[in-house]
Amino acid sequence: MHDIHREFEAYLDAMNLATILVPKSYRDGKIQIFTLETPHKERHPLQIERQIDLGSSMKYECIIDIPIEIGKRYLIYDHQGGVTDLQSGAVVRTVPFDDKFFYDGDLGVAYTQEQTTFKVWAPTATEAKVKLIDPKTKKADYIPLERLEKGVWTATVFGDMEGIYYTYVVCVNAVWREAVDPYAVAVSVNGEYGVIIDLAKTRIEKPSVPPLSSPTDAIIYEMHIRDFTIHPESGIMHKGKYLGLTELETKGPNNTTTGLSYLKELGVTHVELLPFNDFAGVDERHPLQQYNWGYNPLHHNAPEGSYATDPNDPYARIRELKQAIHTLQAQGIRVIMDVVYNHVYMREQSSFEKIVPGYYFRYDAYGNPANGTGVGNDIASERKMVRKWIVDSVRFWAEEYHVDGFRFDLMGILDIETMKAVREMLDTLDPSILVLGEGWDLPTPLPSEQKATMQNAEKLPQIAYFNDYFRDSVKGSTFHLFDRGFALGNSNDGEKVKVAISGSVRKKHGLFLHPTQTINYVESHDNHTFWDKMEIANGHEDEQTRKKRQKLATAIVLLSQGIPFLHSGQEFYRTKQGVENSYNAPDSINQIDWKRKSEHEDDVRYVQGLIQLRKSHRAFRFTTEAEINNHLFFLETPAFIIAYHLRDVQQYGPWRDIIVIHHNQEEKQSVFLPDEEEWHVICDGIHSGTVPLFSVRKQINLAGIGTWVLVK
């Protein structure tokens, strides 16, 4: 690369358009003629289409009438002999660029004992190398990469390269940058380098998991790997680690069941783990000095090292994560992976930006990086090679780690075509793999009809959405702490709660085509826990009353149509001491408090009974709007009671008829039953399950806040 002193700057902004910026300090910014010099030293005059005065400089838009070979070096001269190089500009964000350079093959590293092949997509690079580093001596070798079609660069290195560290070094716009492979599947400590490994050494067979005939059969339990086991009294040896999820028969205070055995006892079908791909925010060398949820993605296809017993061994994190997933599945629990494809930790430092500057992110009309995510960058999933990277990555986790579901963080940032491609690809592997996401509509420069938002749910019928409508009508607004929903004693939202209970399907005035599209929840890792919100919104009530309210809300989640979702510890009133956003708060705030669990065994049993009840009859888990329309009817009740009748449901389970009653006031009340026959009560405010507690006729007396289930 010959360095030239740039008097002015020139950018290729479309396949046939150069934008030239001339500062007024250079010839007053006035240039009559520009000439383009090709790599073969031929010169072509450029036609100036527009001149724009930008104050301190002049902008010239010039038409190029010869085909430009991206990745080759072109120079632009002015009429006085001043010169600059033509840099890749906004052309990388144009459709013709995407079409020309879309590559559908494998990327990353292909290892065998005899040789290793490297492939990286870098269409705007003029040169590229792979840097190989011996981890013991730190000695580096640079191997030049050869450019193939579609902007892919490759090299094959002979010999056994297992354990060698590597990065890519690419030259774009006359600047050399070093980056970790965006397709790296193994990394060194803190993700500084990619590592060449033999993935075959880590493979284990997937155990058979209980069948999942519909997404509504899922009962999702959201947890953070570190939170779940790190409590000093968890009774778990590998605290805060992947392996902590593999320990059975662990006990905490007062002999309470903890960890994996507790999950099994509770009866949930899926655990959803907060991000475990390699993230920033925790120094893997000293993992206990910092805490992070994990929404700062560094390497999307390699596991996080702070959860491994040895973060310096690139194999340890892979083997231990696979073991954790395998053990959960062997115990009958499927694993959902929380994936963060909507942004990267730091755009400027990311491998994407270093290898193909300007391509992987969205920009606004003024050329500034978009920020719909609120963290400084939005991934441009609508571009072909970005979509390919997302689909490839999801496929990798499904095939290599046997993950049973994907929860897409800020899915509304991504585009519908990408989410369709993800779902279609997963259907070819296993249609029971769940795809769910946050469908919030965020201000990112993508037309609203292309966003994978809740409002566009009908365009993605096989994807489920976190239902904030359900959350806010049952609990009250997440963002207005004093706002109270039905479970907190406000009876004005009853009609909204009825929509939520009915699976939020269209016929019941909801957003969704099917109940399989709604994730019903009142609490998640985000925002205040339910208990902490009540401390503020219902501070005038005693603790006993508030516990009844939380059990009521959890019962609404578990008995409504749709997919129920519990936040770990919700079943025993998890508190984060009032911290609203605990993403980097210490373990003392975030850890699951097993002592608290031991103090609320009865309430845990209650939730366990509701889970058992849901599993025992398919009338709680209809899969279509038609079934809900045919069988679910609300009874006439005062506003502080919501009661509904699941009618003629004998083909779905052990009972012909089921009545569910939710009551949000402490005053005793009676509800008249729709006939004279005998009804068996299997759930009241204190006990729950499938065994009759007592029988009633004509009416039932409610002893205050709670949920009653009657069957016949």
Image: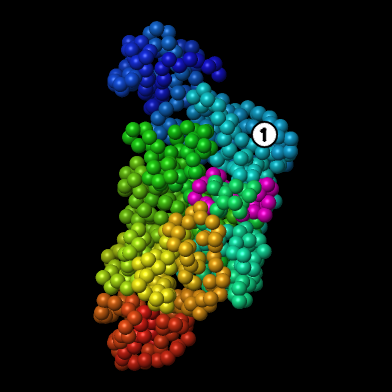
Q: What residue is at 58 percent from the left and 38 percent from the top?
A: 180
State the residue in front, 574 or 579.
579
Q: Furthest residue to the front?
A: 540
State the residue in front, 355 or 117.
355
Name which residue type carries label 1.
Answer: Leu
Q: What residue is at 43 percent from the left and 45 percent from the top?
A: 375
Find the magenta span and give its range. Answer: 292-318
Give above or below for 78 relative to 293. above
Please give left or right for residue 444 compared with residue 340 in the image: left
The residue carrying mark 1 is 132
Q: Quadrant of residue 678?
A: bottom left
Q: Quadrant of residue 550?
A: bottom left
Residue 126 lies, in percent from the top left, at 53, 24
- Is residue 423 visible to us here? no
Q: Residues within 10 Å of mark 1 (few under 14, many from 20)?
A: many
Kind of element beneath mark 1: strand
